[in-house]
Image (spheres, helix red, strand yellow):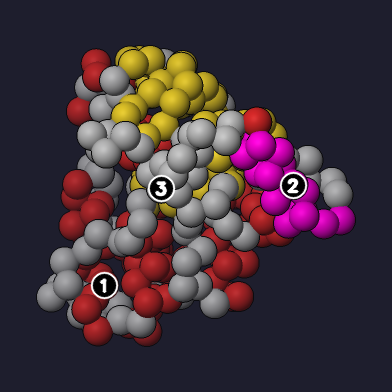
Amino acid sequence: MLEFDNVGLRFRSGVGVDNLTLRVGPGEVVALIGLNGAGKTTLMRLALRMLRPQRGTIRLFDQPLEAAPASSWAGVGALIEVPLAYPELTVRENLRISCMLHGTSPEQVDHSLDAWRLASVADRRFRRLSLGNRQRVGLASALQHDPRLIVLDEPSNALDPASVILLRDQLTRRAQDGAAVLVSSHHLDEVARIADRVLLMNAGRLIGELDTTGNDLERAFFERIREDDERHPVDGELAR
């Protein structure tokens, strides 16, 4: 569904990502974890062609990203950093527009409102929502067209515990139905519950997988980062 082959990008400031190689297959949940500045969001922006690599190849649905037809993007659902919505429109209106953009029947909106427990705020303007409700609108918009590839950057931000469980169930079910899921998070325990693989990212590089079978995931995570920093002491700070 999504493949990076030796992808690199350096910004004018010198920060960026380097030698990114990974594959996310159908029915797989892959989690990215790393400290702030590790390059997780840059990787996801590259996957969505919001940024373009200076070297390497990215493939979407087995096609080079730059050659992927516009119709391919209807099969992608994404939420990067903050939900994109028209602040003066209601929740229902924003979800309807998202359906139209993805070529999905507007009838899907009612299902999304129920699935994400947004019915009570369906006719409220987006700008008047709490942060948690805004995040749920963003997730509903990203997932309501049943995308084949799901790319989510810190999707549990601002969510209450009940909504985190709802998100977990949604991603698990969609992966079971064959979708590929790439998700970044700083909640190690949470991603360990659903991810088939947890990839560590540090200083713009993917540095391996985290074993999630141990009891102290946070300690294991920080130890791996410390070891990598000692091996690469001159890399400096990179983009988030």
Above/below status of 81 relative to 131: above
First to last magenta residue range = 215-230
Q: CA distance from mark 3 to mark 1?
A: 29 Å
At label 1, counting other C-alpha atoms closer than 10 Å, the crowd grade (few under 14, some 14-19, many 20 or more) is: many
Task: Name which residue type carries label 2.
Answer: Glu
* Residue 222: in magenta span: yes
Name the image quarter holding residue 233: top right
Relative to 43, 226 lies left or right: right
Residue highlighted by disc 3 = 240
Residue nearer the viewer, 56 or 38: 38
Residue 87 percent coordinates (x, y)? 17, 72
Relative to 65, 40 lies left or right: right
At label 2, counting other C-alpha atoms closer than 10 Å, the crowd grade (few under 14, some 14-19, many 20 or more) is: few
Task: Name which residue type carries label 1.
Answer: Val
Do the residues bearing badges 1 and 2 touch, measured as CB atoms within 8 Å? Answer: no
What kind of secondary structure does the magenta stretch mostly adopt? helix
At label 3, counting other C-alpha atoms closer than 10 Å, the crowd grade (few under 14, some 14-19, many 20 or more) is: some
- Which residue is rendered at x = 41% and y = 48% of the image? 240
Q: CA distance from mark 2 to mark 3?
A: 20 Å
Name the image quarter holding residue 49: top left
